[in-house]
Amino acid sequence: MPGRSSSSSGSTGFISFSGIESALSSLKNFQSCISSGMDTASSVALDLVETQTEVSSEYSMDKAMVELAMMDRELNHYVKAVQSAISHVKEERPEKIPDLKLLVEKKFLALQNKNCDADFQNNAKFVQFKQQLKELKKQCSIGRSEEKYVVSTMIFSFHREGSRASRKNDVLFTAMRLSTLDGLQADREADGTEGVDEDMIVTQSQTNFICPITQVEMKKPVKNKVCGHTYEEEAIVRMIESKHRRKKKACCPKIGCSHTDVRMSDLIQDEALRRAIENHNKKKNRHSE
């Protein structure tokens, strides 16, 4: 590279770093590949949760996300080390050009030695992945509770209206209902919703599906990273743009929220909620049939 060809002698005034900067540009393009890989791993993990696949498969995707986040961190450190080395040479303008390769390695190792698990909290993709996974698990748990409640209600109604079934079947219906209610109670205890009325559980997820702006069910929900509220993407974008055209700040439309400056950069796709809404509608259509 041009930088290395002048590493033995000469003034920095004659060095061209264009070759190095071109290589850096290629490295940054590779970062987009890592980002795409994280999107794919995240999507697969959500699919596994949605289909209730064994935990080991979900763990594999979690492990893949950690490895991709580590690659992203390492690549970021290397890019920073190269940029720092170039800046150092340009600013110091030493008589003898230092060994750029050695200088980059030194700066890179210094950054790597500061690595810790907390670094992943600075990776937006990784943080979003963990949040979406947690949210989808919660939504799926609510969905299973709804299904158990519906089955329990159907069995109870059938039993209450009176059946001409034999006593043997009568006992069987009772056992099925008790078993279903036991399962519902276990889910509620696991979700921290013990003591909450069954009808509230059934409607809880449906309430979360409503956009605070349009007051209708969302199709492309986006979450506000600052306050955690969700909106229909088109509606919130239109609201922000309208406010900005009038040189005003856009407040979160959720009643009671104190966030007074919603920005486009605050919004992220809420894949978990989108899936939950789709699943809810599929189950609703099946029950109506």
Image (tube, grey):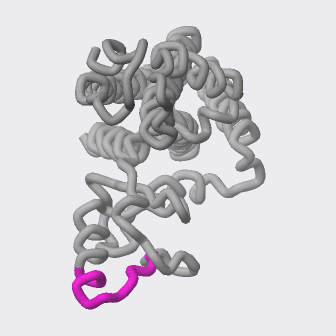
**Of 104 and 208, which appears nearest the observer?**
104
Residue 136: image x %, image y %? Answer: 49, 38
Residue 58: image x %, image y %? Answer: 52, 17
Residue 273 appears anywhere in the view = yes
Left or right placement of residue 284 versus residue 153 in this view: left
Left or right placement of residue 243 versus residue 46 in this view: left
Please say if 251 is above or below 282. Answer: below
What predominant SS class does the magenta segment belong to?
A: loop
**Of 63 and 3, which appears nearest the observer?**
3
Q: Residue at x 33, y 21 (%)?
A: 3
Q: Residue at x 56, y 22 (%)?
A: 108
Left or right placement of residue 31 versus residue 123 in this view: left
Residue 152 appears anywhere in the view = no
Count of number-bearing discs: 0
Magenta span contains residue 247:
yes
Q: What is the span of residues highlighted in magenta in the rendered image?
A: 242-252
**Of 180 and 242, which appears nearest the observer?**
242
Q: Residue at x 24, y 29 (%)?
A: 18
Please say if 68 is above or below 147. Answer: above
Q: Residue at x 45, y 23 (%)?
A: 97
**Of 122 and 128, which appears nearest the observer?**
122
Residue 163: image x %, image y %? Answer: 51, 35
Residue 187: image x %, image y %? Answer: 67, 36
Quarter in which the N terminus is drawn: top left
Magenta span contains residue 100:
no
Please say if 206 is above or below 104. Answer: below
